[in-house]
Image (cartoon, rainbow, N blue to C red):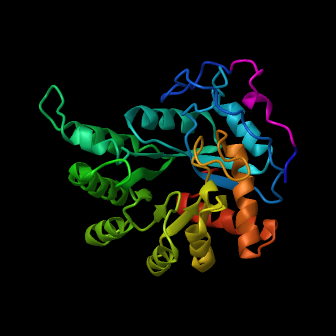
């Protein structure tokens, strides 16, 4: 499954990428160097889409930024036809709108991440408006762009935010649901250690017509709930982790018509390259694992994943 060659833009000796569409998020902290990027997998027989990635995050420690076009070219070379660039604060959401205008292989999602919601909820703008409400108003405006096809990532995260932040997270989640329904867009959910409350809020608010559990982290029971409600489950490289028995059990019972695949790059690099930075060109490693677990030929699985993805986000050509 591996060509044993790292794509040129992801090599430490590569020339710096063009300054256009440079990262809006975090920069390397100058600490201990991380392992380099992994070799590219073999090309998939049927192109698929990366349902969730962050082109604006640089977790590579390369000493240069990989440009948007270079990242997409590397992905396309292994059968990843396009990607959903996901915003999780105002800076990355603005970047997302720039990215969907810059390259037709990109669709977008915009939102305020649940871990950012409590701090914003406790702050005010110079006009005395809640900083969270002001941010949500801008997210709503950005979502009007025709190539923004989802609101996300939003949801609940009880791993990084303690009980004092729950109210702010739930308020933000409910408002994002409202925007998704208003704009007739999919909802991409970030759910970490909060399965029951996420489901409860969706039921209380009335879920949008299309819901995606990004980086699905539940078990077979949550997968059955998703099946019953027609909610999509997007599996990432965590599916390949040795300790992810719950994810493999969930995949086994998930409705195939509700399956999606993603990288969440630069995070969650699939086995056997866990610990290295991730990128959209790494998606075939997870697709191959899904095929092996489900007993699907790669071509058949690719056709399924592509159809499911377009059912959620529409055509990349539109």
Residue 315 visible somewhere in the drawing: no
Residue placed at 48% from the left, 28% from the top? Answer: 24
Asked if residue 219 is positioned above or below residue 77 in the image, the reply reads: below
Asked if residue 21 is positioned above or below residue 279 in the image, the reply reads: above
Asked if residue 18 is positioned above or below residue 75 in the image, the reply reads: above
Residue placed at 28% from the left, 50% from the top? Answer: 162
Q: Position of residue 54 (x, y in %)?
A: 55, 40
Q: Is residue 59 or residue 214 the one in the foreground?
A: 59
Residue placed at 81% from the left, 56% from the top? Answer: 44
As drawn, the residue found furthest toward the left would be 128
Residue 145 visible somewhere in the drawing: yes
Q: Main secondary structure of the magenta part?
A: loop
* Membership of 246 in magenta stretch: no
Q: Position of residue 283 (x, y in %)?
A: 70, 51
* Membership of 9 in magenta stretch: yes
Q: Is residue 43 or residue 311 the one in the foreground?
A: 43
Q: Position of residue 38 (x, y in %)?
A: 75, 40
Asked if residue 97 is positioned above or below residue 15 in the image, the reply reads: below
Residues drawn in magenta: 4-16
Residue placed at 62% from the left, 47% from the top? Answer: 83
Q: Is residue 207 or residue 144 the one in the foreground?
A: 207
Side (left or right) of 142 relative to 282: left
Q: Position of residue 62 (x, y in %)?
A: 67, 25
Q: Quadrant of residue 60?
A: top right
> Split into 4 quadrants, where in the image is the N terminus?
bottom right
Q: Quadrant of residue 63?
A: top right
Side (left or right) of 203 relative to 21: left
Count of numbered tags: 0
As drawn, the residue found furthest toward the right would be 3
């Amino acid at each position: 499954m591996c060509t044993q060659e790292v794509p040129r833009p992801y090599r430490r000796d590569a020339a710096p990428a063009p300054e256009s569409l440079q990262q809006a998020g975090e920069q390397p902290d100058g600490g201990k160097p991380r392992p380099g990027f992994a070799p590219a997998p073999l090309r998939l027989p049927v192109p698929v889409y990366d349902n969730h990635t962050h082109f604006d995050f640089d977790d590579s420690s390369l000493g240069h930024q990989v440009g948007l076009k270079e990242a997409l070219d590397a992905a396309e070379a292994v059968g990843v036809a396009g990607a959903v660039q996901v915003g999780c604060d105002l800076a990355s959401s603005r970047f997302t709108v720039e990215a969907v205008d810059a390259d037709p292989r990109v669709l977008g999602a915009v939102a305020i991440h649940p871990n950012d919601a409590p701090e914003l909820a406790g702050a005010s703008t110079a006009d005395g408006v809640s900083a969270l409400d002001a941010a949500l108003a801008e997210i709503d405006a950005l979502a009007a762009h025709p190539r923004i096809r989802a609101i996300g990532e939003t949801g609940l995260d009880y791993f990084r935010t303690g009980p004092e932040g729950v109210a702010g997270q739930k308020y933000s989640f409910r408002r994002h649901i409202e925007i998704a329904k208003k704009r007739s867009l999919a909802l991409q959910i970030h759910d970490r250690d909060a399965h029951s409350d996420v489901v409860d809020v969706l039921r209380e608010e009335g879920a949008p017509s299309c819901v995606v559990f990004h980086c699905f982290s539940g078990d077979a029971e949550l997968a059955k709930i998703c099946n019953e409600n027609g909610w999509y489950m997007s599996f990432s490289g965590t599916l390949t982790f040795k300790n992810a028995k719950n994810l493999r059990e969930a995949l086994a019972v998930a409705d195939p018509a509700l399956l999606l695949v993603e990288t969440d790059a630069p995070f969650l690099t699939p086995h056997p390259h866990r610990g290295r930075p991730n990128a959209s060109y790494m998606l075939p490693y997870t697709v191959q694992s899904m095929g092996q677990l489900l007993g699907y030929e790669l071509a058949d699985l690719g056709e399924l994943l592509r159809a499911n993805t377009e059912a959620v986000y529409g055509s990349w050509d539109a």
